[in-house]
Image: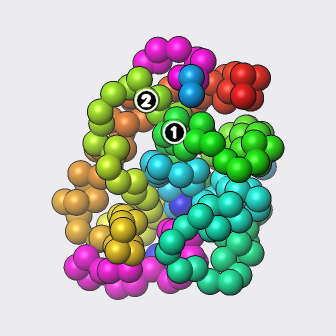
Amino acid sequence: MAGGRRPTARHQPRHLPAPTSTRRRRRNSLRPTPHPHPRRLPRLPRILGLIPEPLQTGPYIRTVLATSRRPHHPNEQAVRLHRQRRLTDVNPRRYHVIIDETALTIPLPDNTIMRDQLRHILTMAALPHITVQIMLRSAGPHGSRRCGFQLLSFPDMEGRDLLHVPHIAGESDIDDPDRIATARRLFDSLAALALSPRDSVRWIENLLITS
């Protein structure tokens, strides 16, 4: 899955800081396992255990925040929804995301919330600048099972890529070129392992039918 432009990492808009060291802050089956041309703006690939924030609906956000033990701002939902506009404004960001199957099949208190969330993902996946892929559990172990990440690329600012890694103690932004190159190779390998964008859409459609 997104410089003088403001990245949407963890999707809190902020100016890209000057470079520093690490800062705190196969397609086997398409059925789910039971249980105008956009400008070249930052490309935002990501793989996560939850549905990525840029694709979350309001009710899904409220459910996630209600069950989270991490402190959050009282206006967190409004802030997230506002940041999502970066994917649908007149100069949308290119967004490539890999979503783990578990994030789409985990039970929620209200099944309607997840069904509406799945429909929203299908709507976003139909946009030309958004690529959605599903990583099936049957794909087996891979390099991002333990931790999701976000890679921000700025085509008009070569050498200013940023790796964003959320973790239990908070978040880290990494600008080390070697680590960023490693993350990019990992993402490319994950994209090859996940369902294709077309098959991912069909998988979500089947999930809506069977859920």
Q: Quadrant of the C terminus?
A: top right
Q: Is residue 31 magenta?
A: yes
| Residue matched to label 1 | 102
Residue 57 picture quarter: bottom right
Q: Nearer the viewer, residue 88 or 29?
A: 29
- Position above or below: 190 against 46: above
The residue nearer to you, when weighing 209 against 55, is 209
Q: Callout 2, which amino acid?
A: Arg
* Residue 180, x across and y down, in percent: 28, 59
Going by the image, does 148 lie left or right of 101? left
In screen coordinates, is 116 left or right of 29?
Answer: right
Q: Quadrant of residue 75?
A: bottom right
Chief secondary structure of the magenta portion? loop
Observer-nearest of 99 and 210: 210
From the viewer's perspective, is 117 left or right of 47?
right
- Separation of disc 1 and disc 2 at Cα? 7 Å
- The magenta segment is 5-33
Neighbour class for label 2 at 10 Å: few (<14), some, many (≥20)? some
The amino acid type found where label 1 is placed reads: Thr
| Residue 171 screen position, x and y as percent | 38, 73
Residue situated furthest left in the rendering: 178
Q: Earlier in the sequence, mark 1 or mark 2?
A: 1
Tag 1–tag 2 contact (CB < 8 Å): yes
Give the residue at mark 2.
Answer: 137
Q: Is residue 143 above or below residue 180?
A: above
Q: Residue at x 36, y 66 (%)?
A: 167
- In the image, taking residue 153 as reference, residue 81 lies left or right, namely right
- For image coordinates 56% across by 23% down, the residue present is 34
